[in-house]
Amino acid sequence: MIRSARRAAGPAALALLTALGLTACSPSSSSASGEGGPSGTVTVFAAASLEESFTALGERFEKEHPGTEVTFNFNGSDSLAAGIVGGAPADVFAAASPATMKRVTDEKLTVGDPVTFARNRLAIATAPGNPHGVGSLKDLAAPGLKVVLCDETVPCGAAARKALTAAGVEVTPASYEQDVKSALTKVRLDEADAAVVYRTDVGAAGDRVDGVDFPEAAQAVNDYPIALLENAPNASAARAFVALVTSPEGQKVLGKAGFLAP
């Protein structure tokens, strides 16, 4: 049974990350895999933008390996990296940028080098029907338009800043959000007129938002790396999950969600 959690950033989130990790260490939730294949719980820390595709892959993994359970923690990549560096046990880390993964590899907390498994581009999310007629990044600077961006410490925010700089546009956002899902939610709840998010998140939202592509997105494409963690409580099953993500079957699921091939 797939289990997932999403949390806000900050000290409280770090404590919860640690609590989740400690749960993964308990005898009832983690076990080594033997000759019969993977078993037990696999705890995956993954960027918020991966929620839909990784949930689908988790369900596939559990079906292919009876006796396994995939537990996800979806959040901003920086918060996840901080949790891992702070000692929250997990099996797999999938980040939305190499820079965020580097925080973990610099501490020598991965087994081998991370592997890029997908890429993602930005888009502008608006309310259905695009009532404010947003057609480009320059339109986000219109007076009175409430724009939401991801915080620059997270990959979607860093990419948005890069794209805005390339377009020569200066935007004063109504708020900075700690992950891309939170930014998109502001638009869905009519608390913002527009948000710079990933194209995959616009697609996952269906008819609840409209998406606007812009050419500067090509200059701010994010690579997504994945790695087995050094102190993984269930390393054997973790390797099998990483193998699924990077397999042709995994790439098909990611491509259907709108991710670009690595």
Image: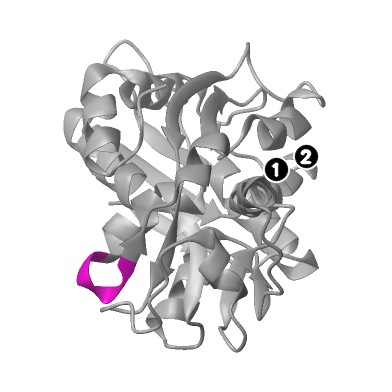
State whether residue 133 appears in this view: yes
Which of the two marks, 2 or 1, is nearer to us in this view?
1
Return the residue nearer the eye: 160 or 256.
160
In the rendered image of this protein, does residue 137 appear above or below residue 191?
A: above
Image spot of residue 249 (x, y percent) = 21, 24
Return the residue nearer the eye: 169 or 182.
169
Could you tell me if the residues under marks 2 and 1 are in contact, i.e. CB atoms within 8 Å?
yes
Is 190 on the left-hand or right-hand side of 67?
A: right
Q: Which residue is mark 2?
A: 85
State whether residue 67 appears in this view: no
Q: Amino acid at mark 1?
A: Ala
Q: Which residue is mark 1?
A: 81
State the count of labels. 2
Q: Amino acid at mark 2?
A: Val
Q: Main secondary structure of the magenta part?
A: helix
Separation (CA) of disc 2 from disc 1: 6 Å
Residue 171 appears in which quarter of the rendering? bottom right
Q: Which residues are magenta?
A: 206-210
Return the residue nearer the eye: 255 or 53.
255
> Which secondary structure lies at badge 2?
helix
- Residue at (82, 26) in percent of width and height: 107
Image spot of residue 117 (x, y percent) = 43, 24
How many neighbours does mark 1 have within 10 angstroms: few (below 14), some (14-19), or many (20 or more)?
many
Is residue 94 magenta-colored?
no
In the rendered image of this protein, does residue 242 appear above or below residue 88?
A: above
> Which secondary structure lies at badge 1?
helix
Is 7 on the left-hand or right-hand side of 28?
A: right
- Residue at (77, 34) in percent of width and height: 103
Is residue 207 magenta-colored?
yes
Return the residue nearer the eye: 7 or 78.
78
Is 227 on the left-hand or right-hand side of 187?
A: right
Image spot of residue 152 (x, y percent) = 72, 55
